[in-house]
């Protein structure tokens, strides 16, 4: 049950969906605002938060916490991990898994799931100009 007319913000909702689809990585709400404003300059942060929440309720997005802040990624993804760039604050999706993490467990511990975030520098930050 959504009180507002679902068609009212169709253009903004579609623009938000498009940036999440084309980003190919998890996006923080502030990143969504920055990307969508190139096509919808009037977009407000409140609209972004509300739309992201609706997409989570719809089961299309899932919120993840990376480096202490929430990012949103597509729900229909294979098991994967994340890379967090400490320089530009972006989060990237890393496809695949080593599958060997259970080796870390002492005897008697049973793994049911795991999350893994690798921190470092993304390609554009690691090749920053020296001069
Ligand atoms: Zn970076
Ligand atoms: Zn894994």
Image (cartoon, rainbow, N blue to C red):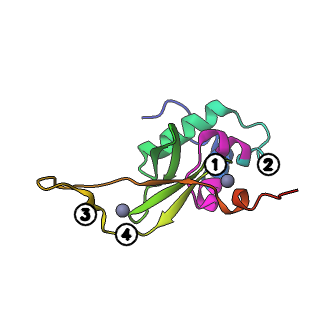
Quarter of the figure with residue 5: top right
Of callouts 3 and 1, the N-terminal one:
1
Quarter of the figure with residue 6: top right
The reply to whether dot 3 and dot 1 touch (C-beta < 8 Å) is no
User: Few, some or many C-alpha atoms within 10 Å of disc 2 (few <14, some 14-19, many ≥20)?
Assistant: few
The reply to whether dot 3 and dot 2 touch (C-beta < 8 Å) is no
Marks 2/4: CA–CA distance? 38 Å
According to the image, label 2 marks what residue?
A: 38
Ligand 2 within 8 Å of the CB at mark 4: yes
User: Few, some or many C-alpha atoms within 10 Å of disc 4 (few <14, some 14-19, many ≥20)?
Assistant: few
Going 53% across and 44% down the picture, which residue do you hit?
A: 71
The reply to whether dot 3 and dot 4 touch (C-beta < 8 Å) is no
Marks 3/2: CA–CA distance? 47 Å
Marks 2/1: CA–CA distance? 11 Å
Marks 1/4: CA–CA distance? 33 Å
Going 13% across and 56% down the picture, which residue do you hit?
A: 107
Mark 4: which secondary structure? Answer: loop
According to the image, label 1 marks what residue?
A: 16
According to the image, label 3 marks what residue?
A: 103
In the image, farthest residue toward the left: 108
Q: Which residues are magenta?
A: 18-34
User: Few, some or many C-alpha atoms within 10 Å of disc 1 (few <14, some 14-19, many ≥20)?
Assistant: many
In this rendering, the label closer to the viewer, 1 or 4:
4
The reply to whether dot 2 and dot 4 touch (C-beta < 8 Å) is no
Viewer-proximal residue, 56 or 10? 56
Of callouts 2 and 4, the N-terminal one:
2
In the rendered image, residue 121, in percent from the top left (x then y), is placed at 63, 55
Mark identifier at residue 98: 4
In this rendering, the label closer to the viewer, 3 or 1:
3
């Amino acid at each position: 049950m959504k009180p507002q007319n679902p068609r009212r913000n169709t253009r903004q909702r579609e623009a938000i969906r498009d940036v999440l689809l084309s980003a190919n990585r998890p996006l923080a709400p502030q990143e969504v605002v920055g990307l969508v404003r190139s096509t919808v300059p009037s977009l407000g942060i409140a609209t972004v938060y509300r739309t992201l929440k609706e997409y989570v309720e719809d089961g299309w997005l899932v919120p993840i916490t990376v480096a202490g802040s929430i990012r949103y990624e597509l729900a229909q993804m294979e098991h994967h991990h994340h890379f967090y760039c400490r320089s530009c604050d972006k989060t990237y999706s890393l496809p695949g898994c080593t599958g060997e993490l259970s080796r870390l467990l002492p005897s008697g511990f049973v793994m049911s799931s795991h999350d893994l975030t690798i921190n470092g520098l993304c390609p554009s930050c690691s090749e920053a100009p020296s001069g």
